[in-house]
Image (spheres, helix red, strand yellow):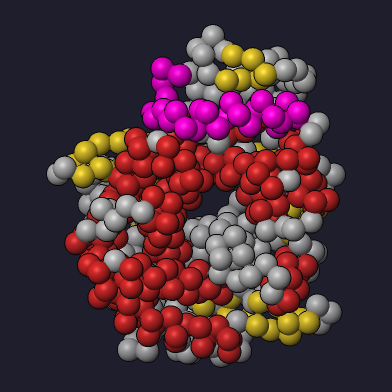
Amino acid sequence: MQQAMMAGAALTLSSLTKSALGAPMVADFPVVRIPEAQRKFKSKAVEALIAKIQHHISNKELAWMFGNCFPNTLDTTVAFNVVDGKPDTYVITGDIDAMWLRDSSAQVWPYLPLCKEDKDLQQLIAGVIHRQAKNILLDPYANAFYKDSSQESEWKKSDITDMKPGIHERKWEIDSLCYPIRLSHGYWKATGDTTPFDGAWLAAMQTVIKTFVEQQRFQGKGPYTFQRNTAFATDTIPMGGYGYPVKPNGLICSMFRPSDDATIYAYLIPSNFFALESLIQLQEMGKAISSLSALVAPAAALATQVKTALDTHAKVQHGTLGNIYAYEVNGFGSVNLMDDANIPSLLAMPYLNAVQVDDPVYQNTRRFVLSPDNPFFFKGSAAEGVGGPHVGLDMIWPMSIVMRGLTSTDDQEIKWCLDTLQKTHAHTGFMHESFHKDDPSKYTRKWFAWSNTIFGEFVWKVYRERPHLLKA
């Protein structure tokens, strides 16, 4: 686990130097990155990029933060092996020893552009793809898995659902099946390598399509139910574990959000947009790779249904902003207007290529999300940003500030995001799950690799496209 520095530690600006271990660092900032000898995986390409960016960023605190955050997934969360002659990579979230399909995809995503110059890194990510296919085939309705079946879930006794050995948690979330497709498609585009897309991967993708169709609920409620003995309403599903009724219309039901919190209305709009993009990516791969051609027709048919339903049901008229995208709907006319920091979110849809950033409805939605009209937009003396029910009121997720920057085309807004992240990391050098809007030293999860890696992705994007914003 990362060593978080005490809040209030003095930080000063100075020049780039080398640590005693030979790794790049910024002098006079505390060394918080895990020692080299303890790092889980070392990538020459990643280290070279860190040194390059740190050398050119005149804002040395941001340079230091980038050097801590960007490699955090590789440093602390990956376990690489070769199983049956194929790479196999288990990726934990950080302080939870389990592999989420969502998090593991997002954690390694920013490293894809470096794979061509680092074949070991490419093999590591290929191993993630192999492991995810195995997990999907074990149970497409599960969101998180263990390294092997010998580990017993903490939820085994409290969850009323079909738990299998090797499953950490069985919360059905659309995005859990979208993220592995995004990673596979991105890997293929970055490397041209098709070896991970074997018979098991094809079977896993066919299972994804089958699961999506089941959760359209045209043929009944489907096989999935979930209930948990808990005091938290967001951790269980009502109505016998099926959720509140929906009117089948082509959208896909998601019993949980990317936050792992229960939906109110099961048609989760940003996740359905993500599913549509994933189905388009499967079609592209199926047309280009002959062994995957069986995916094209079913993916296309389902994509047509989901797109038609989104065109009909995703938008709602807001009193002052015009048409915006709803967060959740149920097909009967009920609408939940909000956004949650976890990705996919309404704010993040252009980042996932699910909508275009200049889409007028998205821009209206963006104004809604970043305003007091969104019940989970919090503004305090330290910062403003989006949170969610998962950790409660007044807690801003750094991920939402990163996503605001990643989906912005405005220099001033992007610079604000960088400045805000710089002043709210509580002198730790790392991102967190959330922090209090008035006091960044009150934060949750000091070891949350996804938040770290996506911050690094943001800084790298700014470095490539707007380097002038990285000045002190």
In this view, 29 is above or below 85: above
Q: Position of residue 48 (x, y in %)?
A: 52, 28
Q: Residue at x 41, y 21 (%)?
A: 38
**Which x, y percent locates residue 430?**
61, 33
Residue 38 within the segment the image draws in magenta: yes
- Judge left or right: residue 119 versus residue 458: left
State the residue in front, 436 or 70.
70
The quadrant in which residue 339 appears is bottom right
Residue displayed at 16% across by 42% down: 85
In the image, farthest residue toward the top: 20
Image-quadrant location for residue 122: top left
Most foreground residue, 429 or 221: 429
Is the residue 155 above or below the residue 315 in the image? above
- Is 470 positioned to the left or the right of 52 in the image? right
Rendered residue at 67%/19% (across/down): 16
Is 40 a magenta residue?
A: yes
Q: Nearer the viewer, residue 76 or 287?
A: 287
- Magenta range: 36-62
Q: Is the stretch drawn in magenta largely helix, strand or loop?
A: helix
